Amino acid sequence: MVLVVDDVPAMGQQYAYDLKRVGKYDTMVAAGGEEAFDILGREPIDCVVLDLEMPGSDGFDVLRRLQQRGIETPVIVYTGTGSYDRCVQAVRLGAYGFVDKAEPIERVVQEIESALSRGRMARELRSLQSRFDGETSLIGDSEPMRALRAAIARVAPIPSSVLIVGESGTGKELVARELHRLGPGAKTPLVPVNSAALPEQLVESELFGHERGAFTGADRLRRGAFETAGNGTLFLDEIGELPLPVQAKLLRVLEDRQVTRLGGNRTIASGARVVAATNRDLEQEVSAGRFRQDLYYRLNVHTLKVPPLRERLSDIPVLVDHLLRSIAAHLRVRPKTVAPNALALLVAYDWRKNNVRELRNCLERMMIASDASVIGASDVPPEIQEEDRDDTSDPTSEPGSLKALKAQAERQIVLAALEKHGWQVTRTAEALGLADHSSLLKVMRRHGLKSTHRDT
Ligand SMILES: Nc1ncnc2c1ncn2[C@@H]1O[C@H](COP(=O)(O)OP(=O)(O)OP(=O)(O)O)[C@@H](O)[C@H]1O
Ligand SMILES: [Mg+2]
């Protein structure tokens, strides 16, 4: 898709029309910089054709802002002034090429083609690089991660089932991939099946396959995941969601090491290694009667626990680094870095909702929100800035625990200092060695202390 940016609507439309006719591109038109950025954020634009002369925010300004935001979509500028200097200046600002308005549309198409092929090459290179970096490898050198890696290496070569448990977004799927890589290996398939949200019959045919005519609508034979996985890995994601009747069939298949397609009677041997994952507490599911105990025992011969992110906060800096690069490659923008004070906020947050996935989403938002190449503390989402996960921060923690005691002590210290300084926030903050009065206000809010006295 090619985006034409021109302040004269008729001009833009004409260009778009000609480009569509001669170059066979899908096109869009923007009447200025603002609109262009809007569209770039929304549509999969492969190339921008930009008018240099526009009132207000001109082409140079747009180029500068593209550069600041790290947007690498190639830009071809066109100008009616015929000034060589201006074109050179545009190229310095990152334009891929330039044409004169007097030149035939074929020239523009030529420029676009060459920009697109360069973009394709850059993308291929990046994807090769990321494959080389091992997209599937588990990042983190904290104690829990090292223990997890060791456990993976230990069970990977064993053909019995493996159960991966852990909160949502902790990296269970990555662990499954790692098990496959170190186990059955890349020459065999890894077949993921996510049974959540699928109706019972579909889950069954997904797993075991069906013969033609097995049920209404089964108009052709379908091989199930057990068959497709061959001697590779069958990854049963969200196993806790599996309907009870399917659990019974799955158990039988695991015991007999052979499957029968729905509506068929021929048995097919299965050599696939089964890896199951869940974020539910399966033991609890068993007691609640929602999960078969015998299947649970079958699956949990080897259990790998993926630790939540808050128990390995020391992994955050390397994870941030890795995720930023991966996001940049995904969004096709230049990678950014995170300033130390912003990183400190990320390390202090407790990532309770979605663990690494939450961190990834947060970084993506920050990357898009920030104009600079270094993401600063002010770009950190407010909910993360708010939560000071300083150990003393939670006055509501278990009474008698170290945390609660610390919180209590903190409250007393702050209260005493406030009394001493007549509740003058600025002066108290100074006395307590806090950065400014707003940090004190935050601490006070946490402890339910109100500044009844005005600061003068
Ligand atoms: N240790 C890690 N190193 C690098 N990336 C990670 C790590 N852990 C998780 N991620 C990334 O975090 C995201 C979530 O991981 P994944 O999908 O494996 O989690 P999950 O436990 O399967 O989550 P859910 O329970 O929601 O299915 C992915 O983008 C993954 O690449
Ligand atoms: Mg998952």
Image (cartoon, rainbow, N blue to C red):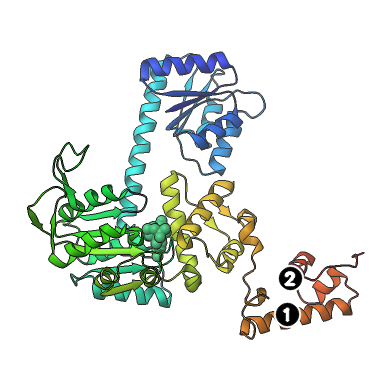
Q: Where is residue 273 in the image (x, y as percent from the top left)?
A: 19, 64
Q: Is residue 181 visible?
A: no
Quadrant location of residue 249? bottom left
Quick one: label 1 or label 2, which is nearer the N terminus?
1
Report the disc number at residue 443: 2
Q: Quadrant of the N terminus?
A: top left
Element under label 1?
A: helix
Q: Which residue shows up at 47% across the image and 45% down it?
A: 333
Element under label 2?
A: helix
Is 160 drawn above or below residue 213 in the view shown?
below
Quadrant location of residue 214? top left
Q: Where is residue 442 in the image (x, y as percent from the top left)?
A: 74, 67
Report the disc number at residue 167: none
- The residue wearing badge 1 is 410
Q: Position of residue 241 (x, y in %)?
A: 36, 58
Would residue 89 be found to the left or right of residue 122 on screen? right
Residue at the outermost left position: 266
Q: Nearer the viewer, residue 131 or 88?
A: 131
Q: Nearer the viewer, residue 121 or 167?
A: 167
